[in-house]
Image: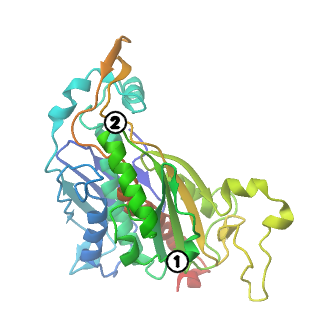
């Protein structure tokens, strides 16, 4: 299987399955001398881990990361950083009933046809549990580019949406972490949580959107052709399980405007009157806030009977068992931020090696 490495100069390679012994990875290209805050790394993992509230899966994993190499006396040595997270609460028996069945909207059918074999226990490598490795690497990347502030929040659940601009919300950690859905609008958050609970009680799932905002981003990040900043961010987001869409700046709404309405006119200091470009012009950051929205589908595993096929092509009825998220959004927040940080850390390494190395200073 290819495609397990993300990044070019600052890159992470991950391994492991949802119900295997462990998951882990290797971070290559991290500069030496970076003093790590291990509490912050664990904090990010805690935001992603299961069992943290009644609106997520109740799988009980401590999700403690063990670093194996590349760190000495709390500082990076410049050598590959190896890490592992052991699985403690996997119940593979919950998946025996789908051993020979293809779940609707899952990777079962495509994995079997591509590789001739599949790990049916929790989806194996296709499970969203793989993202735990991204969060570890992203937490380190955040500390590498610590002047840049990356913040994400849940902006909609089903038909319930935050109708305020991110500029009119309190995007502090305290505000976003105040409720289990991780939405900074407390009134809307309460409605979102109630909706997820109703959907869960029906044995169903629900999707929604997350908005990510990048502040203190310097001018000049990104390359103008195949490695545009928004293209790399889009690739990073679309690699996350359950993501169905990505838009930055005005996104699809911009198609309803004329050029005179959409153009971001400049002030003498280089700032723009509006920011419909989303902080990126020509694939390069312009110093304004970067903001983008990601769409997440409803979780495919539902606790309702569905008609599907088995490996022989016969119609069968199946029903989900075990512990599953009725909505992935609150646990996806740290994953979105981690992937954003990995993209920016990679660009940081490029600029560090070029004549424009002062960009991140």
**Where 29 sits versus 307, above or below?**
below
Above or below residue 23? Residue 76 is below
| Residue positioned 79% across, 65% down in the render | 262
Which residue is most to the bottom? Answer: 269
- Foreground residue among 55 and 242: 55
Image position, residue 100 (x, y; %): 28, 20
Tell me which residue sits at (21%, 38%) in the image.
Answer: 322
Q: Circle 2 — which element?
A: loop
Q: Is residue 82 left or right of residue 249?
A: left
For the point 23% across and 33% down, the residue is 321
Q: Mark 1 points at which residue?
A: 352
Position in image of residue 35 (x %, y %): 31, 82
First reached walking from the N terminus: tag 2 or tag 1: 2
Please tell me which residue lies in front, 273 or 228: 273
Q: Which of 80 and 225 is in front in this view?
A: 225
Residue drawn at (86%, 66%), measured in percent from left and top?
260
Q: Which label number is shown at residue 301?
A: 2
The residues tagged by marks 2 and 1 sit, at their Cα atoms, a distance apart of 44 Å
**Visible residue check, residue 71:** yes
Colour convention of the picture: rainbow
Neighbourhood count class around disc 2 (C-alpha, 10 Å): few under 14, some 14–19, many 20 upward: many
Q: Where is residue 85 in the image (x, y as percent from the top left)?
A: 21, 57
* Residue 248 against residue 174 in the figure, above or below: above
């Amino acid at each position: 299987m290819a495609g397990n490495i993300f990044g070019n100069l600052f890159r992470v390679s991950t391994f492991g399955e949802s119900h295997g012994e462990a998951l882990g990875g290797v971070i290559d290209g991290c500069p030496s001398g970076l003093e790590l805050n291990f509490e912050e790394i664990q904090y990010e993992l805690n935001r992603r881990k299961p069992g943290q509230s009644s609106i997520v899966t109740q799988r009980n994993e401590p999700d403690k990361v063990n670093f194996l190499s590349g760190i000495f006396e709390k500082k990076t040595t410049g050598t590959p950083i190896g890490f592992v997270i052991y699985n403690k609460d996997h119940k593979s028996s919950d998946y025996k009933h789908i051993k020979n069945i293809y779940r609707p909207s899952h990777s079962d059918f495509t994995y079997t046809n591509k590789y001739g074999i599949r790990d049916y226990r929790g989806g194996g490598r296709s499970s969203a549990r793989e993202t735990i490795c991204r969060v570890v690497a992203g937490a380190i990347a955040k500390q590498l580019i610590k002047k840049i502030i990356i913040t994400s929040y849940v902006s909609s659940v089903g038909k319930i949406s935050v109708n305020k601009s991110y500029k009119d919300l309190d995007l502090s950690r305290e505000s976003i972490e105040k409720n289990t859905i991780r939405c900074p609008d407390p009134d809307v958050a309460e409605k979102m949580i109630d909706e997820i609970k109703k959907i869960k009680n029906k044995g169903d799932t629900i999707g929604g959107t997350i908005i990510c905002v990048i502040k203190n981003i310097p001018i000049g990040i990104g390359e103008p052709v195949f490695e545009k900043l928004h293209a790399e961010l889009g690739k990073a987001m679309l690699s996350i399980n359950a993501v169905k869409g990505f838009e930055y700046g005005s996104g699809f709404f911009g198609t309803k405007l004329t050029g005179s309405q959409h153009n971001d006119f400049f002030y003498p200091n280089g700032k723009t009157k509006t920011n419909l470009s989303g902080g990126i012009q020509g694939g390069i950051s312009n110093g304004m806030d970067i903001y983008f929205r990601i769409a997440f589908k409803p979780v495919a595993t539902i606790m309702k009977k569905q008609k599907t096929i088995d490996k022989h092509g016969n119609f069968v009825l199946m029903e989900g068992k075990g512990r599953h998220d009725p909505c992935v959004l609150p646990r996806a927040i740290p994953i979105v931020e981690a992937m954003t940080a990995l993209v920016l850390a990679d660009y940081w390494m490029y600029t560090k090696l070029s004549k424009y190395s002062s960009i991140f200073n």
